[in-house]
Image (spheres, helix red, strand yellow):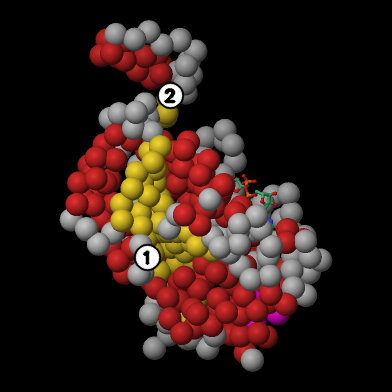
Amino acid sequence: MAHLVTLIPGDGIGPEVSDATRRVLDATGVPIEWVVEEAGADALAREGTTLPGRVLDRIRDSRVAIKGPITTPVGSGFRSVNVELRQALDLFAAVRPSRSLAGLPTRHPDVDLVVIRENTEDLYQGIEFERGTPEALELREELRRLSGRELREDSGFTVKPISVTGARRIVRFALEFVVAHGRRKVTLGHKANIMRFSDGLFLSIGQIEAEGHPEVWFEEMEIDQLSMRLVREPAEFDVLLLPNLYGDIISDLCAGLVGGLGLAAGANLGWEYAVFEPVHGSAPDIAGRGVANPIAMILSGAMLLRHLREAAAATAVERAVDRVLERGDARTPDLGGTSSTEEVARAIEESLRR
Ligand code: NAD
């Protein structure tokens, strides 16, 4: 029976890299019934919302989706579709692997990292108060009353909640991930000395839960120190466990260590649903030119195949990507080549069929 998979092409370079991915996944021979749904700018123009309820229903039906990036216009008042999706489907874990790829010389040749990012809480929860609004002024008053601190009247606010419930499930997820994937170590990043009751809570839950997994090497590190060490000695790290904001930033850093955003795959996982997507955004600077690197989304597709228990096909896709990169004759401009999105997809497809 075919696997039912919802495909959200996204916008910007999203449709280009989505086409390439669909083509490569179909070439594996794994039977997939694609259900294509629009979200983002097109959905907004047609239906007045960037994330129609129907799209969520389709994902709930198929339980598995793959999406291209979706633009979040800055300061437009629209909430990010990506954040909304993660919250609506309770996709609390983002998993983003970064490994050195054959034929791509980088400063560090032996990187093999996985970032596990808490996806629903922290500064991305979406609780914000705009400067000068009655709500912001009221909050300022309340904070003065509760903390005795005077905040500037022209302040805007973004709230950073981290709960025991949220922290515990992502910590458990990360520890179990290490065991299930034969990895060795978890490094929990935080700034608990400054944010004692949010990051501090995340850290203490990490320490408590790690005691139940003596087979996993658990360490904690302040996020600034972790950033420095990651660019100097990334091979020392294995699985990084991070609250939402740090996870977002550090996963781009890790993508940069192995050749850039055009190669960085990702998955958003919850207990019930899984949405796979590249780490990169909609890249408006190159959209529509047919030069976007499709590999990040193709590798996200490989993660999807593994999730569907099609491990052989997943490995075949990863090997085909490796072979094409190693050969070096089909590369998009971000990797120093001159090939188009389609040419790279075709090269991977041909390598897969061989
Ligand atoms: P971006 O990732 O879109 O682009 C950053 C840089 O990387 C750009 O120079 C871009 O050309 C390049 N790049 C990204 N992907 C590439 C690819 N596949 N091939 C070649 N080059 C690539 O980040 P941004 O410019 O900060 O964000 C653009 C929009 O995307 C924003 O609206 C942002 O909110 C959104 N965004 C969406 C997601 C998502 O859908 N999950 C993630 C991040 C950003």
Q: Secondary structure at mark 1?
A: loop
Q: Earlier in the sequence, mark 1 or mark 2?
A: 2
Observer-nearest of 292 and 71: 292
- The residue that appears at 66% across and 58% down in the rendered structure is 106
Between tags 1 and 2, which lies in front?
A: 1
Per the rendering, the mark at residue 183 is 1
Above-or-below relation of 43 to 308: above
| On-image quarter of the C terminus | bottom right
Residue 187 placement (x, y as % from top left): 37, 50
Q: Is residue 238 visible?
A: yes
Apparent side of residue 35 relative to residue 330 in the rendered image (left or right): left
> Can see residue 80?
no
Query: Is ligand 1 within 8 Å of the beta carbon of the residue shown at mark 2?
Result: no
> Residue 122's mark?
none
The quadrant the N terminus occupies is: bottom left
Residue holding disc 2: 157
Residue density around tag 1, few if under 14, some if 14–19, many if 20 or more, within 10 Å: some
Q: Nearer the viewer, residue 28 or 63?
A: 28
The kind of residue on which mark 2 rests is Phe
Crowding at mark 2 (Cα within 10 Å: few <14, some 14-19, many 20+) = few
Kindly identify the residue that appears in the image at 57 percent across and 79 percent down.
Answer: 319
Quadrant hosting residue 185: bottom left
Q: How many marks?
A: 2
Q: Quadrant of residue 350?
A: bottom right
| Cα distance between the residues tagged 1 and 2 | 39 Å
Magenta segment: 345-349
Q: Are marks 1 and 2 in contact (CB under 8 Å)?
A: no
- Return the x and y of residue 274 as percentages of the image width and height: 39, 64
By secondary structure, the bulk of the magenta-drawn segment is best described as helix
> Residue 353, relative to residue 46: is it above or below?
below
Q: Residue at x 34, y 44 (%)?
A: 220
